[in-house]
Image (spheres, grey):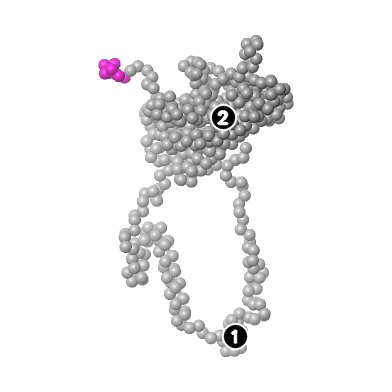
Amino acid sequence: MSERGDDGFEAKVPENTPGSPSPDARADDGERPGGHAPVGENAGTTGGAAPRPRGRRRARAALVASAVLALTLIVTLVVPPARDGLVNLWCEVTDGVCPVEELPPITEDEETDPRVRMEPEEAALWGNYVALGDSYSSGDGAGDYDPATAEPGGCWRSEHAYSRLIEQEFDFAGALGFYACSSHRATHMLEQLGTPESQIERVTEHTSLVTLGIGGNDLGFIPVLRTCMVRMPLLDNGACQAQEGEIGRRLDAFEEDLAEVLGQIRDRAPDARVLVLGYPRLFPEDPQGMYYTLTVSDQQWLNGVGRDLNERIRDVVYEVDGDVYGGRGSGSVEYVNTYSALNGYEVSAEKAWLNGIVLGQLGEGLRVDRASFHPTAQGQMSIADRVRQQVEQGPERVLYVSRETLASVDDDRLAAELGGPLAPVVGPPAPGAEASGG
C-alpha cells in the first residue's frame, strides 16, 4: 500500500541552466566576440576613457539609496523594536508621505503559537479515548461479549476488541468510551446525530484519541460474500464478480459519508488524534485452492474489493488531514493500514485468526452468519498491534494540541464528558427527580 506524501526525491537545480554560460566561459568574460577588449581596458594608449556625467552618477546614487531605505522599512515592519523610528525617518525623507493610519500592534498570535507541539504518544493520551465503528471494531466474532450487547440486533462488544487492548496498554489521562456497534454504517452514524444512540455524539472536546473502523457494511461485504458463496460454483460462475458495478457505486457514496463523519468528529474534538482503520485481507494473497464454493479467482477478486475499500478510506483520510495541517489546525486524522494484519492466518489457514463460515443444520447448506469472516480474539490482538504502532509512531508530520484545551483538562472534566452530552442516564435517579416527576 503506498504511503502518502513525499516520494523521497528532491528537485535539484542544475549547476548550469540551459543556455547559461559554463563556469569556464564566465571566467573569460573579459574577452568579447571579435577579440575586442572591454571598454576602459588598455584605454591609456588613447588618453583614458571619457568620465561619466555627474548627473547620471547622482541619479544612480539616489536610486540606490531609495531602494535600500525601502527594503530596510519592509524589514523593520516585521521587527517591532525599530518600527517607530524608521517610520519617522521615512516620513522625513519623503517630505511627509506617511501612513494615514497607525500601524496595527503586534498580536499575541504573532508572538506565540496557540498550539503546543507534542510527541505522538503524548498527543494521544492527554484526554479520553473514544472507540467507534462497526463489528470489526466492536469485536463481534471474538467472544466474551458484554451481556447487555450480546443479543439479536445488539452491538456485540467483546472484551477482546482492539480498543480494550489499547486501553490496557497505554496510560490515558481519562478513560475509554467503547461505542463501536455491530452492523453499523457511516450512514447510520450520520442519521443518528442528535440522538442518545449516536456514536459520534460520544466524542467531546477533551477526547484525545478516537479510533474508527467503518465502511464494510456500507459496501455490503457480508451480502457480497453470501452472493459469492451461496451459488452453484460450476453453473453460476459469474454471479460473484458481477457485483462489481454496484460495489463501485456504494463506495462512491461511502467516500462522501466518511468525509462527513470525520468532519463531525473533528467538530467535537478538534485536538484529538483520529485513527481510521482499514480492513484486513480475508483470503491468502496467493490462494492454493477453493474455499468451500469460492474459486481461486473469486478469492483474489474479494481481496481486491477489500483493497479498494481500504484505498478509498485512506484517500479520504489523507484529504481531511491535509486540510487540518494546511490550515494550521490541531489534532490529526490518520490512516491505520491493517490489510496484512492477518497475513498467514487468513480464513482458510489451519489456525485462522478469522472465523470461517457458519454451517447450518443438516440440509440447510452454507449459512453466512453475522460473525463469519470476522477476527477472532487473536485476530483482534494483531489489529491492536497496528493501532499501537500508529499511536507510538504518529503520522508523517508533527502534531499539535491547543494550549487552551490542555490548560482546561482535569479529572473531573474528563469524567463528566465521558459518554457525551446525550448519553442515556444509567444508575439511580438524581435526588429529587421522583418528587418532581422527572
> Where, quadrant-wise, is the C terminus in this rendering?
top left
What is the number of callouts on the image?
2
Residue 371, picture quadrant? top right
Disc 2 target residue = 219
Is residue 173 at all visible to an observer of this figure?
A: no
- Residue 198: x and y in percent read 43, 27
- Residue 36: x and y in percent read 64, 81
> Which amino acid, mark 2?
Leu
Residue 191, picture quadrant? top left
Q: N-terminal of the two: label 1 or label 2? A: 1
Identify which residue is drawn at 36% across, 64% down.
86
Please tell me which residue lies in front, 191 or 208: 191
Disc 1 target residue = 43
Element carrying mark 1 = helix
Query: Around disc 2, counting alpha carbons within 10 Å, would you say few (fewer than 14), some (14 to 19), or many (20 or more)?
Result: many
Residue 422, picture quadrant? top left
Identify which residue is drawn at 64% across, 17% down.
366
- Residue 90: x and y in percent read 36, 67
* Cα–Cα span, label 1 and label 2: 86 Å
Question: Magenta region: which residues?
Answer: 430-438
